[in-house]
Image (cartoon, helix red, strand yellow):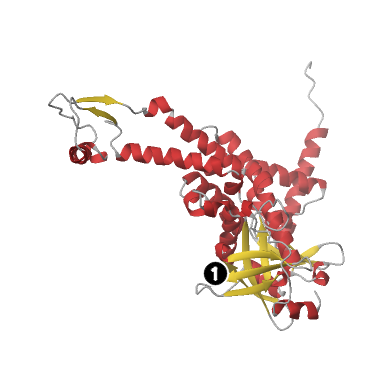
Amino acid sequence: MSLLNRALNFIGFERRTVNPSWNGAVLLRGGSVTPGRAESLSTVYACVSAISETIASLPLILYKRTDDEGRERAADHPLYRILHEQPNELQTALEFREMMQAMCLLRGNAHAEIKRGYYGQVISLIPLMGDRVATLQLDNGRLAYDVTDTKGRVRRLLQDEVFHLRHRSDNGLVGVAPITASRETVQLALAERDHGNSTFTNGTRLSGILKFPSKLSPDQRARIGESWASQHAGGANAGKTAILEEGVDFSTASMSMEDAQWLEARQFSVEEIARLFRVPPTIIGDLRHGNYSNSVEMNRVFVVHTLRRHMTMWEQAISSSLLSPAARQVYFAEHNVEGLLRGDSSNRADFYSKGIADGWLTIDEVRKYENLPKLTDAERNQAAQTQHSQTQAGTQKGTDPQPDVGA
């Protein structure tokens, strides 16, 4: 964007060609499912927590490409501290990234205002509340964001001033959250949860019709209804025996939990919501199909098929919004997922042994993966002597003449 266009946009000389915040992105505002209400479901909360907490806890490192086609940590770059330690004065890197990732999952979009220093370097990222940001597209094709503060005042930020994370989008400009795209699934789970709450609150029994031999006045109906509710409604009154007189008859008109297959429906809702977020059920505590033999593999599935998309979203958004075109040729951000992909100790030992034997791993690299310090020269010499002795012993054992069995 030229300086002239940037100045004209700042003072309002532009037309809004399209508002990408179309109805599909804000369906939750008009429906009965809101992000807060959806997250009151334990499955939604667990899925969002599993993804956002894991993403936030992974090391997000800014690397610099080296001349030998390798890479090294760019610890001296200002963006390194922003991503790895503290993006603003109020939040740590984990808190900021967890908040942004959760907003992206629940609302489809997450925004943070980019604060830059004198030389254009990013010095802080300030998260913006999703319900106070309106996305617009300008005549020049770029985006702008109208941000409303707590006093109702609106200020405009340009595309270069906002770090924007999107969930899967239908128009390429704003994202759509899973609970928006499949809100009926969440509504069904909420209805099942509310049904259970209401049933247990009302004592789980005595839901039906009172039949009277004669017609009642409106006042009589009201008094009898209040009296019945005070004696038989609520969990504290569960199991009480109703005493009827004057020819009054009670007939059950409710469907029991067993008839409604309530427990089976609740379990199916867990699987449905986990499917929305692409989270293996074992990750969120549904261990019906989990055991010791497949739990490690489920963790790998979680990393490869669930987290990889979100990690790539972060890495590419950092490159696009926080690095200049020239800087992208030298620097790049990447998550370190080695800790999540590590198997058990025996599998790791076999993997390292083969890597060292085939020459594509060194002992120091293995010790680095295991969070161990490098070997000293004395320890390296001792290890080499031990390995040589073991090799010689194996060779001698294989060449010793075999005893004559027939002698």
Q: Which residue is mark 1?
A: 91
Question: Looking at the image, which residue is at 63% across and 51% down?
Answer: 24
In this picture, residue 374 sits left or right of residue 195: right
Residue 128 in picture, x, y percent from top left: 58, 67
- Which residue type carries mark 1? Gln
Name the foreground residue: 32 vs 268: 32
Name the foreground residue: 225 vs 306: 225
Question: Looking at the image, which residue is at 58% across and 65% down?
Answer: 96
Residue 212 in picture, x, y percent from top left: 19, 27
The residue at the far right in this view is: 68
The answer to whether 148 is drawn above or below residue 223 in the figure is below
Residue 169 visible in rendering = yes
In this picture, residue 313 sits left or right of residue 244: right
At numbered mark 1, what does the secondary structure look like: helix, strand or loop?
A: loop
The N terminus is located in which quarter?
Answer: bottom right
Residue 346 in picture, x, y percent from top left: 64, 41
The answer to whether 169 is drawn above or below residue 272 in the figure is below
Label 1 neighbourhood size at 10 Å, few (<14), some (14-19), many (20+)? some
Residue 335 visible in rendering = no
The answer to whether 212 is drawn above or below residue 77 in the figure is above
